[in-house]
Image: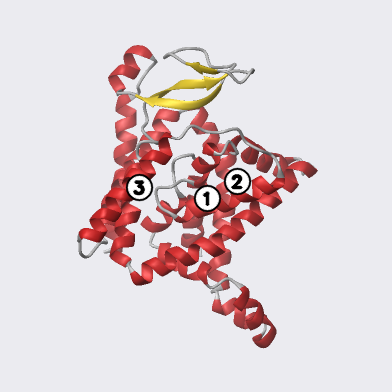
Amino acid sequence: MLKLMLKGMAMGMAEVVPGVSGGTIAFITGIYEKLLSTIALIGPQLIADFKQKGFKYVFDKIDGFWILKLLSGMFAGIIIGVFAITHILEHYPILLWSFFFGLIIASCFYVAKQVKRWNFNSIMALILTTCFSYVVTTIAPTQGNPALWFVFISGVIAISALILPGISGSFMLLIMGMYTIVIPSIKNALKTFELESVFILTAFALGCLTGLMSFARVVSYCFKKYKNTTLAALTGFMIGSLNKIWPWRYPSLGVDELGNYIKLAPKQIVDNFKIISETNVSPEFYNNNIGDSQLLFALTLGFFGFLLIHLADSKVK
């Protein structure tokens, strides 16, 4: 029980960090296919089963205890992520991104090794999803909308991204301009129970539930019918996402209070701007023009992230 809850907790914490996918964590911890098949069972048919055969049958059919353990861990992970991971991201971004960069690189090798036969379809799937994932990471965020219908749609998109390793749900929120609306609302709903924040949280949760039940069926079907191609595609999603979690970067484009786009130079004060784009740079450029690159610590944490996946892979074998 504790082991499964810890896996769920890791997924929850990962989803709070823009650029890191909970789906990646699910895959490398060995619960990805089980998660998809379990979610795919949830639907209108369960209502009919409930009426005919009762609660216990439905609960056993969807492996209710397994879901409850995982969800409780995810919920705890999201709470930790909202308060702790965001704090680390604000004060030690290079070190956090370095850890996840090493983690994702190792995950790419791990998932690619699951492909039993590389052919034209699997290679094309790898190339296309790598390009798609990379392009997604370069899209500038738009202005968010606190309307409940848009919050609902944001939940659908974010949870669909969660299912795909390499596509971060929180990063999709960032692109839609909803990250700064949803995350603070979750904090307020949990701390103050403010009615507006509770409504936003509820609409977002309903969107997540809708997206989860629909998109999981699609991916689960692909796994059953085209497993090699699907695994290659998932590898590509993760490779393309590496652009977003490169540790050394600086804010390069912002929007001021009047809505004007402002190009930012290294070390330029950004307190009055909303950052919408960042530029990746080398550790040497960062060290010379921006600040301490923390290269030694960054490499150490990146290696540690890589080693974690290697050890997990060895343990599975």
Q: Position of residue 13 (x, y in %)?
A: 51, 46
State the residue at coordinates (49%, 67%): 217
User: How busy is the neighbourhood of tag 1: few (under 14 within 10 Å), some, or many (20 plus)?
Assistant: many
**Numbered circle sitting on residue 79:** 2
Disc 3 and disc 1: Cα gap in Å?
A: 18 Å
Q: Position of residue 19 (x, y in %)?
A: 44, 40
Q: Please give left or right for residue 114 compared with residue 75 in the image.
A: left
- Residue 221 is marked as none
> In this view of the protein, which residue sits in the foreground, 258 or 67?
258
Residue 110 in sight here = no
Distance between mark 3 and mark 2 Cα atoms: 25 Å
The image shows a total of numbered marks equal to: 3
Rendered-image quadrant of the C terminus = bottom left
For marks 3 and 2 on the same chain, the one whose residue lies earlier in the sequence: 2
Closer to us: mark 3 or mark 2? 3
> Do the residues bearing badges 1 and 2 touch, measured as CB atoms within 8 Å?
yes
The type of residue carrying mark 2 is Ile
The disc label shown at residue 238, or none: 3
Q: Amino acid at mark 1?
A: Gly
202 relative to 42, above or below: above
**Quadrant of residue 72 in the image?**
bottom right
Q: Earlier in the sequence, mark 3 or mark 1?
A: 1
Q: Earlier in the sequence, mark 1 or mark 2?
A: 1
In the image, is 152 to the left or to the right of 158?
right
